[in-house]
Image: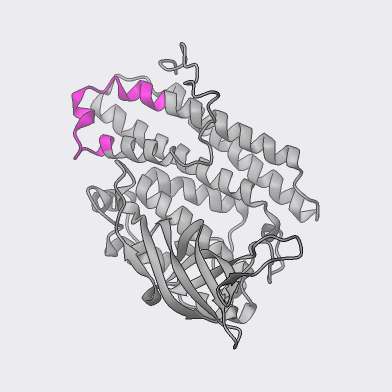
Amino acid sequence: MLTRNEIRTEMLGASKVPDVIINDIHEQRWLQVWVPKIYGGLGYRFGEGLSSLFEWAKTDGSLGWMLTLCAGANFFSRNLKPNIGKELFSDSKTCFGGSGMIGGTAEQLHDGNYLINGLWHFATGAPHLSHFTLNAKLTKNGTPIIDENGNEIIRSFIIPKDQAEIIPNWKSMGMKATGTHSFKVNNAEISEDYSFVYDQFFTDDALDRIPFRVFADLTLLVNYLGMAAHFLEEAVIIRSYLKVDPLHNWIESNLEVTLHFADEIECILNNSELVSSEKQSEIHEFGISLVENLSHKVLQVYIQLGIQATHTDSVICRIFSDFFTATMHSNFRPALTDGELPDLHDRLFMI
């Protein structure tokens, strides 16, 4: 198993996660933290899995992000028919990933299979995926299939990698090693067995009932906290006199709150109760505030590091770029009113 420093050395300047790290990931089954043990996965509990995501992001932001999103896609193992789930995840190299957007169509054929066509964007981990996940509109004879409420039916599908074409078009300043690219599918015939509906499960576990909003919020938050913790490690190497202990303690405190939310959610689900909309909103509002404050704090440290921190081949610049690229994710991006900028008076330069 590679050490943290060995992983960081391999990741520095990489355009995708290097094979030596990918092989280690498969051996440890890190991509299968959310896959039930009955399918060969690690079957981590919610807080346990989040703690791992934090550590991976603290090791390297691009690595943590790729592992988080691909392991998150592997969560769909729970939505598959048991025989399909066991078949796919008996292989430690099985890795799902894809897009949450609706980018194409699934034409229903006479034999019950589907013909998939379309283009989807932002599939993290694309070079390493064994299967692409996608959402498509169901059609029959070229006409959208409508449900009882008059809405077009959307279904999710799993496509083997050899039936998808990767379009390498990631141009952002950070997250360069996540392998986040678009992909295209052209006339791929897929069995209905490899389709699923997000809120229909074939396993019997409390984690099946985690609201997607909560799962997304908490898995992203531990990534931001992990990247910020790594940022502080490198900052004091450049400026040893920086007093970062208060910020380090603040990060640890908010990590504890995040993990407490995870334990609270799992306790609610273990009691066969629903996670209330109020609790979901509480977690989301916590996340919005955390990301905003954390961004200001990271920036405050960064502007004290000097020109060295702007060198594009430096470790600190890579972490900074990864962090601020990741925080552009729409999940916690604050809404602006009437096109105005948010009031950052006094907060921008305060820790």
Q: Is residue 253 visible?
A: no
- For the C terminus, the quadrant is top left
Q: Which of the 4 quarters of the picture holds residue 145? A: bottom right
Say which residue appears at 63% left-offset and 78% top-offset.
82
Magenta stretch bounds: 297-317
Counting from the top left corner in percent of width and height, residue 29 is at: 46, 66
Q: Which of the 4 quarters of the picture holds residue 209? A: bottom right
Q: Nearer the viewer, residue 249 or 285?
A: 285
Residue extending farthest top: 346
Q: Nearer the viewer, residue 115 or 88?
A: 115
Say which residue appears at 50% left-offset and 16% top-offset.
343
Q: Nearer the viewer, residue 227 or 173?
A: 173
User: In the displayed structure, would residue 250 be above or below residue 173?
Assistant: above
Say which residue appears at 70% left-offset and 63% top-offset.
205
The chosen color scheme is one colour
Left or right: where does residue 37 sit relative to residue 308?
Answer: right
Q: How many numbered tags mark residues here?
A: 0
Left or right: where does residue 109 sit relative to residue 307?
Answer: right
User: In the displayed structure, would residue 292 be above or below residue 213?
Assistant: above
Chief SS of the magenta region: helix
Counting from the top left corner in percent of width and height, residue 102 is at: 52, 59
Residue extending farthest bottom: 111
Q: Is residue 216 magenta?
A: no
User: In the displayed structure, would residue 250 be above or below residue 218?
Assistant: above
Q: Is residue 43 visible?
A: yes
